[in-house]
Image (cartoon, rainbow, N blue to C red):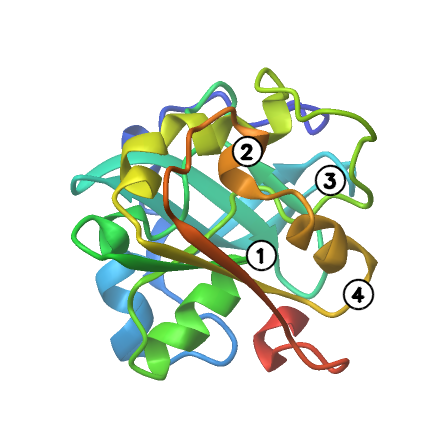
Amino acid sequence: MNTTKGREDSPVSLLSKPSLGSPLPAPGSSDATCRPRKVARAERVGIPKLGAEVDCIAFPYFRNGELVNIKFRALGEKAFTQIKGAEQIFYGLDDIADSKEAILVGGEPDKLALDEAGIRNVVSVPDGAPQQVKAGDPDPNDAKFAFLANCAQYLDRQERIILGVDNDGPGKARGRTRPPARAGIDAGGCAGQTVAMSNAKMPTTRC
């Protein structure tokens, strides 16, 4: 496997493989929370940042109950990869399909931790927070924010969007992106609010 590029397998074929199927709760979340979302261990996944194949935790991304993408996070290290060419959408997208208020967080473990607390109208960005925000007007063609355009119809339904970001540089940068505007989406009368986590961050960000 080429460890310098994203996986080329289709999300559906990967999810059916024996090497991706053993349930593995995300740190801070129980099996009861993670199992329905098919969070699982994935063996020997090529991670570009590490230049090696390592065991990972896999986060499947669904829309309307159909698998769209899988994100892999190395066990014990903060390194990731996704399915090459897969469409970028929010993690947990179906949980805001019928909501009027959505909470946007910066990682799948944060989303699952809020699930654990009984807060379901939460989605996570697929690629973390940027280190900094580009100066000037938002670029609707910025690939980093393609997931916003891909999920525009879900955001359009929201009367209020809360950004739950880490209280660090990347988190604050994400909080300044104004998601609907970054994607060139008309937010209409949607109210926005940014909530910074504590300096210690959420405990689930350690995985």
Q: Mark 1 Cα within 10 Å, few/some/many (few <14, many 20+)? A: many
Numbered circle sitting on residue 181: 2
Between the C-alphas of marks 1 and 4, the distance is 12 Å
On screen, 205 above or below 148? below
Visible residue check, residue 88: no
User: Looking at numbered disc 2 in the image, what kind of residue is underneath it?
Assistant: Ala
Residue drawn 42% across the image and 40% down it: 70
Between the C-alphas of marks 2 and 3, the distance is 37 Å
Identify the mark nearer the N-term, 1 or 4: 1
Of badges 2 and 1, the one in the foreground is: 2
Identify the mark nearer the N-term, 2 or 3: 3
**Nearest the camera: 126 or 164?**
164
Residue drawn 52% across the image and 43% down it: 126
Of badges 3 and 4, the one in the foreground is: 4
User: Looking at numbered disc 3 in the image, what kind of residue is underneath it?
Assistant: Ala
Identify the mark nearer the N-term, 4 or 2: 4
**Labels 2 & 3 near each other (Cβ < 8 A):** no
Numbered circle sitting on residue 52: 3
The quadrant in which the N terminus is found is top right
SS for dot 3: strand
Between the C-alphas of marks 3 and 4, the distance is 29 Å
